[in-house]
Image: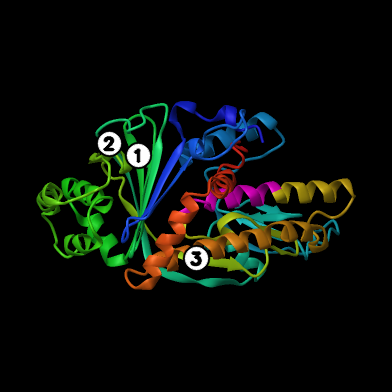
């Protein structure tokens, strides 16, 4: 879509490898292009880490470059309701009319709801969204590592460990920085947010290194985790190579620790009369696979194709019949991904019993199948291309 050139490349971090392992059994899978067959010209990047502000700024610059777009900012939507017949006889009774906080009103031939999981556009259209809460919170933070990572500046590695309470992931950022995404119980998330920077840093290091039983104890004490973790790491016996774990965290960026509830939701449909939903307004997914943004971008691209085809055919772009190809293209694909991530979450929430052995066997088997790993990596990477 031409936005990539407007994104600050100094704040973009590609990574070329991902290490994923079972926090109970230690079974591991490594995603890196050296272990799979690929074409000589196949890029080795698995994914890119980009700050939301950087991505949004790039998209807005691209809109400005294209022209023909009016941006209302800063302002907010006060209400959405159906229109009426105008004084000059134009019938807007089926058109959504958006009232802004500055008093202006906008009548939409097609209103696109890209307004998040609690979408007012979805509520206006009367579209139900079904699913469940996971009883987990996602804790996020920006971390400073002891160095640029084991692979140096040119070979960044992402790490993810599946714990019974939820996965914890460390994703590389430029320089010595990294992003934390830790899915855990709400009480534990609250404790993590209350800790001093030293204790929080210690808990992150422990999450990738200590057994689940040790983590249970560390979450049961109100403070003092830094000393406790240091002692336990000194006396812990581990057969894992140091480079198979993330580089130790040195500090947490001030005021970067936050938490949000995790849930699965899927709208009954993505369209109504003169309404279309994209991204979190249409579906919310567990963050364990990092596919939420990719799903939203796929929705947007599909909707653009659908609207373009309707326009070429001379159809009303807001009519449900004209929007049906968008639903046909995206609904099942999104539903499959939602289901896969949901099942992974449930599979790795089991802390003992035969399920642990079976999932570990499966993980090890997939790790030995380069062709299968290659499929997963190409799906995650979009064939190595950034489509923005």
Q: Position of residue 62 (x, y in %)?
A: 62, 32
Q: Is residue 108 visible?
A: yes
Is 217 positioned to the left or the right of 327 in the image? left
Report which residue position mark 1 lands on. 178
Cα–Cα gap, marks 1 and 3: 26 Å
Name above or below for residue 38 compared with residue 284. above
Earlier in the chain: of badge 3 and badge 2, it is 2
Report which residue position mark 2 lands on. 145
> Between 381 and 114, which is closer to the camera in this rendering?
381
Q: Quadrant of residue 133?
A: bottom left
Q: Position of residue 91 (x, y in %)?
A: 83, 62
Element on which disc 2 rests: strand
Count of numbered circles on the image: 3
Name above or below for residue 189 compared with residue 130. above
Q: Residue at 34% across / 73% down in the picture?
A: 353
Q: Residue at 61% across / 47% down in the picture?
A: 297
Q: Is residue 352 magenta?
A: no
Q: Position of residue 102 (x, y in %)?
A: 56, 50
Q: Quadrant of residue 94?
A: bottom right
Q: Which residues are magenta?
A: 288-301
Element on which disc 1 rests: strand
Q: Is residue 292 magenta?
A: yes
Determine which of the numbered discs, if any, sits on residue 342 in the image. 3
Determine which of the numbered discs, if any, sits on residue 98 in the image. none
Q: Position of residue 89 (x, y in %)?
A: 86, 59
Earlier in the chain: of badge 1 and badge 3, it is 1
Is 223 positioned to the left or the right of 352 in the image? left
Looking at the rendered image, the quarter that the C terminus falls into is: top right
Element on which disc 3 rests: helix
């Amino acid at each position: 879509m031409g936005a990539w050139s407007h994104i600050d490349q100094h704040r973009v971090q590609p990574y070329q490898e991902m290490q994923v392992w079972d926090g109970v059994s230690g079974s591991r899978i490594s995603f890196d292009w050296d272990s799979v067959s690929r074409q000589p010209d196949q890029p080795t990047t698995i994914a890119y880490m980009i700050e939301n502000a950087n991505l949004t700024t790039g998209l807005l610059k691209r809109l400005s470059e294209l022209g023909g777009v009016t941006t209302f900012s800063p302002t907010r939507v006060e209400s959405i309701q159906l229109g009426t017949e105008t004084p000059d006889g134009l019938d807007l009774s089926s058109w959504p009319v958006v009232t802004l906080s500055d008093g202006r009103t906008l009548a939409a031939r097609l209103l696109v709801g890209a307004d998040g999981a609690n979408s007012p556009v979805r509520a206006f259209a009367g579209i139900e969204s079904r699913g469940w809460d996971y009883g987990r919170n996602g804790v996020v933070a920006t971390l400073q590592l002891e160095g640029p990572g084991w692979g140096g500046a040119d070979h960044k590695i992402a790490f993810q460990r599946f714990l019974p309470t939820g996965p914890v992931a460390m994703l590389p950022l430029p320089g010595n920085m990294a992003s934390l995404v830790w899915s855990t119980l709400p009480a534990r998330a609250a404790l993590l947010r209350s800790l001093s920077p030293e204790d929080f840093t210690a808990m992150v290091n422990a999450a990738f290194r200590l057994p689940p039983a040790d983590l249970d104890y560390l979450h049961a004490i109100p403070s003092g985790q830094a000393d406790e973790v240091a002692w336990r790491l000194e006396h812990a016996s581990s057969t894992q190579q140091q480079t198979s774990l993330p580089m130790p965290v040195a500090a947490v960026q001030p005021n970067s620790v936050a938490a949000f509830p995790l849930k699965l939701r899927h709208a009954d449909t993505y369209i109504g009369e003169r309404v279309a939903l994209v991204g979190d307004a249409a579906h919310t997914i567990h963050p364990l696979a990092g596919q939420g943004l990719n799903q939203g971008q796929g929705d947007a691209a599909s909707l653009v194709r659908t609207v373009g085809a309707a326009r070429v055919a001379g159809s009303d772009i807001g009519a449900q019949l004209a929007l049906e190809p968008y639903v046909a293209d995206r609904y099942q694909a999104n539903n499959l991904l939602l289901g896969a991530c949901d099942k992974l979450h449930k599979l790795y929430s089991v802390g003992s019993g035969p399920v642990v052995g079976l999932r570990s066997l499966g993980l090890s088997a997939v790790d030995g199948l380069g062709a299968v790993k290659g499929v997963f990596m190409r799906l995650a990477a979009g064939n190595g291309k950034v489509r923005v």
